[in-house]
Image (spheres, helix red, strand yellow):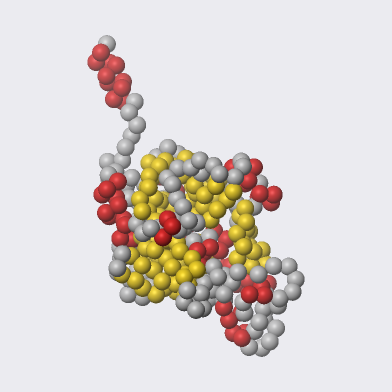
Amino acid sequence: MALRVSLAAVLSLPTVSCFAIEAADLYEKRSPSIWLVSVHDAQGQRIKMGSAVVTGHEELVTNCHVLTQGRSITIKHENTAHAAQLAHADVERDLCIIRAKGLAAPAVKIAPVSTLKVGQKVYAIGAPRGMELTLSDGLLSALNHDKDDKLTRIQISAPISPGSSGGGVFDTDGRLIGIAYLTLKDAQNLNFAIPADWIAQVPARAKVALEKFRAENPPQPAKLEKAPVPTGGQPHLITHNSWRLVLRRKSFTVNDIAGGGVVNSFGLSFTLAFWTAHAGRGNELGGGRIQGH
C-alpha cells in the first residue's frame, strides 16, 4: 500500500520543463537583451522612460505609448548607449519596433501562444522607475480573451511599475512570452503583458494601418511631405480591446508619418484612456485605475 501511495504521489506531480532554468541563470542569459529607453523632446530633455527587448539584428520592441510626444530615442544598457529610430508602429496593439544602428545584443526567443498555461511561473525584466535590469517573478494569472475567444492580453502577478513598459516577460525556459504594458492600480497584482507572438506581425500590420490612415486622410496640397493635417473635426480614433489612443490632428503634419508605421510617434499627442464603456473590459477587471507603464 505504501508503495502504491508513493507511486501515485509521484505520478501526480506537476510536469516541469526539462529545460527550465533558475531565476539567476535566466537573468544572466536574458538581461543583455533588455534595454532602457529614454525619450527626449526637441530640446533634448528626457520626458519619458521605458524598456525594450532585443528581438532581431539591431531591432528592439517596446510599447508605442512609451515613444509618444518625443522627438528622439536613446537606448541604454549599463554603460552602452545608442540612438534609435522608429521602424514600425502597430499602435492598435501598442507594439512598436525601433532600430539602433550598431546594436550588438542577443535576440530573445519567442514562445508560441499555444505553450502558455495559467499558473506557470513567469519572470519580468525591465526598468521600473528607470532602475535598469530589475527582475521580478510571479505567475501567469490569466489569459484574457475577447468575445470571439481570441487572446487579447496576458495577465501576470509579477510586479511591474512605470518604466517597465516594453520590458520582457519570460517563461522558465527563458523564452519571451509577453511585453509588459499595463497595471490596474488600486488592485493587487493585476498586471498585463501583450503576447510576444504578435511581434512578428507588427511590420505587416503597421503597413496596412498606414495605408488606411493615408486613405482616410488624403493630402490637400500637392506636396504631401509638407502638407499640414486639418485641425478641425473629430480626432482620429484608433481603438484597442482595453483602451483607446486618441490622435490629436492639430499636433503634427503629414511629414511626421513614418514609412513603416501608422504614424511617426514623434510630434504626436496620444491620450491613453481605459476603454470601459465601449469595450466592456472595465467591468471584467472591476474597480481601480489603469496605468500604462
Quarter of the N terminus within the rendering: top left
64 displayed left or right of 254: left
Vertical side of 174 occupied by 259: above or below: below
The residue nearer to you, when weighing 201 against 77, is 77
Q: Is residue 196 visible in this depiction of the protein?
A: no
Q: Most extreme residue toward the bottom, as rendered?
A: 222
Q: Is residue 37 visible in this depiction of the protein?
A: yes
The residue under the point 32% across, 50% down is 174
Vertical side of 208 occupied by 275: above or below: above
The residue nearer to you, when weighing 262 against 275, is 275
Q: Could you tell me residue 260's position as x and y percent?
A: 51, 73
Q: How many marks?
A: 0
248 displayed left or right of 154: right
Q: Most extreme residue toward the top, as rendered?
A: 1
Vertical side of 114 occupied by 264: above or below: below
Residue 9 sits in which quadrant? top left
The residue under the point 64% across, 52% down is 275
The residue under the point 53% across, 56% down is 292
Q: Could you tell me residue 183's position as x and y percent?
A: 52, 49
Residue 81 sits in which quadrant? bottom left
Q: Could you tell me residue 160's position as x and y percent?
A: 45, 50
Q: Could you tell me residue 286's position as x and y percent?
A: 61, 41
Q: Most extreme residue toward the left, as rendered?
A: 3
Vertical side of 154 occupied by 252: above or below: below
The residue nearer to you, when weighing 232 against 219, is 232
The residue under the point 64% across, 67% down is 247
